[in-house]
Amino acid sequence: MHTMKMAAVLGLAFCFVACAPKGDVVPAEPDYSDTTQWYVADRDAAVDVFYIVSTECDDYTLGGKPMHYADTRNDSIRALLYGEMVGVDQLLAGELNYYSPYYRQVTMETYTSDSLVDARMPLAYGDVRKAFDYYLEHYNNGRPFILAGFSQGAMAVVDLLKSMDDSTYSRLVAAYVIGYKVTDTNAHISPAQDSADLGVTICYNSVRDNSCAIPFLSAGNLMAINPVNWRTDATPAMLVDPRYGDTLTVTLDTTSLLLHIDGYTRNDYMLPLVGCEGNYHCLEISLFCDCLRRNIALRANRASAQ
């Protein structure tokens, strides 16, 4: 009762929930029947992209309370997620339908502690599962679909794959786990072997060399593919940075399953709080956007032709 009165007085939509760490204030659950909880671009295409955004929020204060989850009804927080939703739609979706839900993602500070990640991520996972279920029932209409996510969004993609039923999986074109690891395989999680196989998982993590890896993102990873030449061996590929025109060499280290990038000399990539020099986590989409867009279109065309 006290919490409800506080929310009413402050005009805030948060509550204390049992699944969050003790003391955490949690925003109200998104209602996915509310169109404001979605970014949707319906292009009347035969294939959909369901995209889950990465960590866009730092810790913030709302009504004097410290917040560690995105409030999907707060305009300033929504703007952060919206920016990525629009950007990825423009970079990757092409002519495909595109659906991206707002969800109570955890803030960047959460990643400074493994125990906080373990305690807080179930709330974010729960929102994404509910959003995906709503999408399947109300938006998808039985079409083939692509799952994609970056960083925290990639974590949620892996979570969806683990719980996906056979009927839903039969329509999965491919899952793009960008900037995170896959530590389990099952009937619904199998590594991509080339540029056109279907029902597979694409995964990569980019570094200058193995010493630059961030263990939370890549330790124990079981699969990787080079998104430039779509090979799983160590054949190098040349990539022209679509932003600056620099020529880079991209090689998959088949032992660590890390993607080595040679020739990147700019300083615009450091991940806040948990990043390190030579880890290119923040560039996983921007560097490879042309390769990803062409590949998504290729796999979508194959799926829709079946």
Image: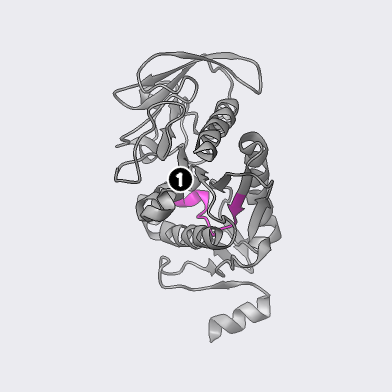
**Residue annotated with mark 1:** 172
- Give residue 24's position: percent from left, percent from top: 47, 66
Left or right, 269 with reference to 45: left
Q: Nearer the viewer, residue 69 or 148?
A: 148
Is 145 located above or below residue 224 in the figure? below
Q: Furthest residue to the bottom?
A: 1
Image position of 242 (left or right of 222) = right
Residues drawn in magenta = 99-110
Q: Any magenta on residue 26?
A: no
Is the residue 161 above or below the residue 190 in the image? below
Query: In the displayed structure, would residue 51 be above or below residue 288?
Result: below
* Residue 159 in view of the camera: yes
Q: Quadrant of residue 184?
A: top left
Residue 173 is situated, as x and y percent measured from the top left of the image, at 47, 41
When the figure is inspected, residue 9 is found, relative to residue 207, above or below; the finding is below
Q: Secondary structure at mark 1?
A: strand
